[in-house]
Every structure is written in C-alpha cells, then in structure tokens.
Amino acid sequence: MDTILNLGLNDDVVEGLALVNEIRRRAGIPELPEGMSLAEFRKAVIQERALELAFEGNRLYDLRRTASVTATVPEATKLSEEQAAFYPIPQRELDLNPNVK
C-alpha cells in the first residue's frame, strides 16, 4: 500500500482505494468514499494504519515518515518536524563514547 501511496498517480489512488475497500468489506465496516484526492487518500490510509496497528509501535514511524509528528502529538509541539524525525543519542552512549559530542 505504501508503494501505491508514494507513486502519487490518480490510477494508483483508484487501485489503492479498491484494495482498502476490499479489506474493509471483509471486515464488515463501511468503505472509503470514491473520488478521493491523493492527499485525502494518504490521510485515510495513515488513519487506517493508526487504528489497525494500535499498540504495535508503528504509529511514530508513520508520523515521522509523513512529517506530521508535531501536528498530531500535542507533547511534540515545541519541536520542529526535523527534530521530531530523529531519536536522541542515549546519554549512556554519550558518556561511554568520547568520540560522540
């Protein structure tokens, strides 16, 4: 699905929407509406992933990949998206490695 989202072609939205709706039909939940723009479709897929993969530790990666950490996580509003994209170096590593400054 990520490959389809990253290509960004209108035909890819149609194909991706068909795949997502196939899964939603099988799960017995309402389908996503047809005629979505690429941006709307991407947002819907990220939301689907948030619900589907809850408590599996994937949400932060999706937010970082889409540069939406600061817009989604209230605790991160003081950070820039660039700062939120990286993990800090653990203090233990800084203490043990003299080559890291």
Image (tube, rainbow, N blue to C red):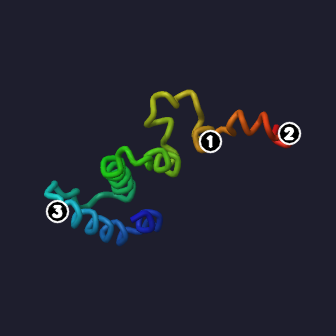
Give the side of residue 62 with respect to residue 87, left or right.
left
**What is the x, y in percent for residue 8?**
44, 65
Q: Which mark is residue 25?
A: 3
Which mark is in front, 1 or 2?
Answer: 2
Disc 3, SS: helix
Q: Looking at the rendering, which quadrant does residue 83 occupy?
A: top right
Q: Mark 1 or mark 3, which is nearer the start of the sequence?
A: 3
Give the side of residue 89 with respect to residue 18, left or right.
right
Q: Is residue 10 above or below residue 58?
A: below
Q: Which residue occupies 27% across, 63% down?
A: 20
Would you name the residue on which mark 1 appears? 87
Q: Looking at the rendering, which quadrant does residue 88 occupy?
A: top right
Under mark 1, the amino acid is Tyr
Between residue 86 and residue 6, name the one nearer to us: 86
Q: Mark 2 or mark 1, which is nearer the start of the sequence?
A: 1
**What is the x, y in percent for residue 92?**
72, 35
Give the side of residue 87 with respect to residue 22, left or right.
right
Between residue 23 and residue 10, name the one nearer to us: 23
Q: Looking at the rendering, which quadrant does residue 85 occupy?
A: top right
Q: Is residue 28 above or below residue 93?
A: below
Q: Which residue occupies 21% across, 60% down?
A: 24
Under mark 2, the amino acid is Pro
Disc 2, SS: loop
Quadrant of the image containing the C terminus: top right
Which residue in the rendered view is the most extreme toward the right? 98
Q: Mark 3 or mark 2, which is nearer the start of the sequence?
A: 3
Which mark is in front, 3 or 1?
Answer: 1
The Cα–Cα distance between marks 1 and 2, rounded to whole angstroms, is: 19 Å
Q: Which residue occupies 35% across, 46% down?
A: 54
Would you name the residue on which mark 2 appears? 98
Under mark 3, the amino acid is Arg
